[in-house]
Image: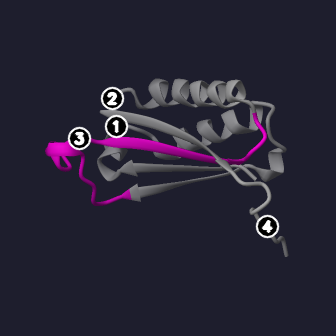
Amino acid sequence: MPNLVMEYAHTVEKVVDVRNLLKSLHHVALSCGLFDAESVKSRSFRCQDWLIGDTGNNEDFIHVSFDLLDGRTQQQKQQLSCQLMEVLQAQAGEVHSLTINIRDMDRECFQKVLN
């Protein structure tokens, strides 16, 4: 069920191979040992408009949201976050702001249909 969503300022494309970065982040999710490979979904969204503090859109960013069903330990989530950040820093170290948020989803409320 995990969903990795990478949002980024369009200016990032000047210094980062966004497609390759997404593939590398996806690989971390596949290889971390916490999920079945077929359940991992990753995607990216290019932001045309954004504001950061008083700088407006003068600073670029990449933000990764990683939603997963509850049940993993804090240590497992921290390790996943660190592995994702290592990839971000290695491939997007020139980007001003790199952030990751790992979020638990309520297993009892989550629904999924495959047709």
Are circles 3 and 2 on residues that touch, CB within 8 Å? no
Q: Toward the viewer: 10 or 56?
A: 56
Q: Inspect the magenta stretch and tell me whether residue 81 lies in it.
A: no
Q: Is residue 24 left or right of residue 59?
A: right
**Residue that appears at 27% across and 55% down:** 50
How far is the residue under mark 2 from the one under mark 4?
A: 38 Å
Q: Position of residue 66 (x, y in %)?
A: 60, 45
Question: Which residue lies under the disc numbered 1?
Answer: 15
Q: Are marks 1 and 2 in contact (CB under 8 Å)?
A: yes
Query: Residue under circle 2?
Result: 94
Q: CA distance from mark 1 to mark 3?
A: 13 Å
Question: Which amino acid lies under the numbered mark 1 shown in the image of this protein?
Answer: Val
Please name the residue shown 75% across and 38% down the image.
30
Q: Disc 1 or disc 4, which is closer to the eye?
A: 4
Nearer the N terminus, badge 1 or badge 2? 1
**Image height of 85 relative to 66, above or below:** above
Percent x, y of residue 44:
51, 53
